[in-house]
């Protein structure tokens, strides 16, 4: 997957969690949680969806690496190379 | 048989837990010993009418767009839409301390604030300090018990106002005699006074059907008429359960919503009731179905009235009698905005009761039934004292005692709110079995569902 693909995947997952999420002006270097008003419960959904869709096992200690759109790309790209 | 997650109990916490897990892993089995789901908040039929067993009002009302509100977070977590339900908001409720003061509140918090300011002007500044405390306090980080009564005593420095604020919050959410944990107080204050009350336009059955439908749609399995008799263990690890009529199910993890000591019994472990700091609380609930009662038409329409006729408000099970009629809760299920009209009206009352008294009576069915009837009469008399009259044309009445609650939900001592000690992180000494619902500590309909969701989020999903 390219970095753009991964961004799209994350955005699609968030849209699925919250239909009303507003992505206009989203800063890829700032925490998704603050910008999209996601709470820790919503955040867990992102992890769980990645697992469901791509069989990715993301250990709890790695959750912080999914904080921003760009950090998601950095963390997920090696894992989703062949996806 | 085997499953990845076994959920014990098909009440609201069990249903929410099972849905949450099934969203990501459908291999979930929910078992409920009764023929119907819902637990404390279920329904039954008499005289061709559906009666709700527990529902007065659901707390935590929120506008549809308020993303951070507990109700909407809960629905998001379960992947349900507001449009799946039809909710009606309360008309307005009252805290009435007879001969002392009365405070109105509604889903607009300003109503309560204005009442406090008007009737307790000397305490208004202190009440605002209480509001700041409620806004700033983090009730979700587990902490040792802190007395809300003592804290309010200091912050408000007004015994009457303190008791009036505590009364509804204790009735709707304290498992502890004469007090409530400060964290639980903050949760209940927000749920009742800042968010508010509502109910389904139809009945709790509609909500239960949406939940059961969602669980099945996600691939989960529901077994009713199927009790867990025993949990099978290897050390501190649960490996399976003996369920139904001699079946055995193997499982990787368990969420139990049946209570702490109740779960210890299933594990065959010893339990120590003496660890509980106060006696468990029990209640009686009366339902009166009646023809419209014109004499009440001129009375202001209240949704719920929390009343106290005593000099002080006490919140413990009575010692020497079956029921304490000094205080209670009165609910008018038709007094919600936009409730479809019905030809018959319904009225519900709740009072504190003694489990021991009712348990002793239950041995002599004739006396037990007689006492139930007397309880309904005395509760009716209490209302007649409050409102000047009581509907003469009762079509159907029923009384649930602590023994009824014990019989139907297996709650020890018929204690609706379970153990006075809670297990906020769901852990109680097993490495793959966790408590959710009543004894985890979040109470009420929305609370118990959030409890199911958060225990699955914390213990099940990250490890699946
Ligand atoms: C009279 C009354 C009025 C109430 N009014 C309101 C209200 O107006 N608003 C509000 O928000 N809350 C109200 N409540 C409280 C609310 O009902 C509870 O807080 C909530 O429903 C608790 O849900 P739960 O899932 O934790 O427990 P429960 O509902 O007790 O669920 C536990 C389930 O486990 C089942 N079970 C037990 N043992 C076993 C076993 N061995 N195997 C299989 N299944 C088993 C039980 O049958 C039950 O269905 C009321 C309760 C009562 C009794």
Image (tube, rainbow, N blue to C red):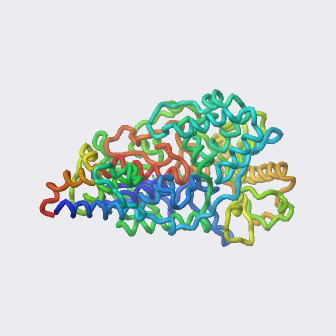
The reply to whether residue B367 is in sight is no
Is A56 left, or right, of B322 in this rendering?
left
Res A9 → quadrant: bottom left
Residue at x-position 79% and y-position 40%: B101
Residue extending furthest left? Answer: A82
Residue at x-position 61% and y-position 40%: B281
Q: How many marks?
A: 0
Residue at x-position 86% and y-position 55%: B389
Is B420 left, or right, of B265 in this rendering?
right
Residue extending furthest front? Answer: A25
Which quadrant does the N terminus of chain B fall into?
A: bottom left
Tell me residue B273's x, y (percent).
51, 34
Tell me residue A28's x, y (percent).
28, 54
Tell me residue B404's x, y (percent).
61, 52
Residue at x-position 25% and y-position 47%: A65
The reply to whether residue B314 is in sight is yes
Nearer to me, B120 or B406: B120
Tell me residue B437's x, y (percent).
48, 48
Name above or below for residue B123 compared with residue B459: above
């Amino acid at each position: 997957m390219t970095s753009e693909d991964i961004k799209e995947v994350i955005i699609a997952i968030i849209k699925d969690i919250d239909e009303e999420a507003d992505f206009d002006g989203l800063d890829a270097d700032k925490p998704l949680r603050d910008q999209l008003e996601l709470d820790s419960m919503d955040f867990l959904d992102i992890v769980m969806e990645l697992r469901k869709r791509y069989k990715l096992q993301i250990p709890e200690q790695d959750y912080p690496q999914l904080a921003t759109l760009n950090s998601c790309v950095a963390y997920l790209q090696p894992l989703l190379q062949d996806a | 048989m085997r499953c990845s997650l076994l959920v014990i109990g098909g009440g609201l916490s069990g249903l929410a837990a099972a849905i949450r897990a099934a969203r990501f892993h459908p291999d979930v089995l929910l078992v409920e010993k009764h023929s119907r789901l819902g637990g404390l908040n279920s329904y039954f039929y008499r005289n061709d009418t559906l009666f709700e067993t527990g529902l007065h009002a659901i707390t935590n009302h929120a506008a549809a767009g308020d993303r951070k509100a507990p109700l909407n977070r809960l629905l998001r977590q379960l992947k349900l839409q507001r449009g799946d339900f039809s909710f009606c908001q309360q008309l307005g409720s009252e805290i009435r301390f007879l001969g002392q003061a009365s405070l109105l509140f509604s889903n607009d918090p300003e109503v309560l604030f204005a009442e406090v300011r008007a009737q307790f002007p000397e305490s208004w500044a202190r009440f605002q300090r209480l509001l700041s405390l409620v806004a700033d306090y983090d009730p979700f980080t587990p902490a040792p018990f802190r007395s809300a009564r003592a804290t309010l005593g200091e912050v408000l420095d007004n015994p009457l106002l303190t008791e009036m604020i505590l009364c509804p919050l204790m009735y709707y959410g304290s498992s502890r005699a004469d007090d409530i944990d400060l964290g639980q107080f903050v949760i209940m204050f927000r749920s009742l006074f800042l968010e508010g009350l509502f109910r389904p336009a139809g009945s709790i059955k509609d909500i239960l059907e949406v939940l059961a439908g969602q669980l099945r749609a996600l691939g989960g399995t529901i077994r009713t008429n199927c009790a867990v008799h025993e949990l099978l263990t290897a050390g501190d690890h649960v490996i399976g359960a003996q369920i139904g009529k001699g079946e055995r199910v193997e499982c990787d993890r368990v969420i139990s919503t049946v209570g702490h000591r109740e779960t210890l019994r299933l594990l065959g472990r010893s339990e120590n009731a003496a660890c509980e700091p106060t006696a468990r609380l029990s209640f009686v609930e009366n339902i009166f179905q009646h023809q419209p009662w014109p004499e009440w038409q001129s009375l202001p329409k209240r949704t719920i009235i929390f009343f106290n006729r005593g000099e002080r408000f006490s919140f413990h099970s009575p010692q020497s009698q079956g029921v304490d009629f000094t205080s209670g809760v009165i609910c008018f299920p038709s007094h919600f905005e936009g409730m479809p009209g019905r030809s018959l009206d319904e009225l519900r009352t709740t009072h504190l009761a003694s489990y021991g008294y009712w348990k002793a009576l239950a041995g002599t069915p004739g006396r037990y039934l007689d006492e139930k009837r007397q309880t309904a009469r005395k509760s009716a008399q209490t209302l007649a004292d409050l409102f000047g009259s009581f509907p003469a044309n009762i079509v159907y009445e029923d009384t649930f005692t602590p023994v009824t609650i014990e019989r139907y939900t297996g709650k020890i001592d018929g204690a609706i709110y379970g153990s006075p000690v809670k297990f906020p992180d769901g852990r109680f000494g097993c490495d793959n079995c966790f408590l959710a619902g009543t004894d985890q500590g979040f109470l009420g309909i929305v609370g118990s569902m959030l409890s199911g969701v958060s225990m699955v989020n914390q213990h099940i999903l990250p490890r699946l």
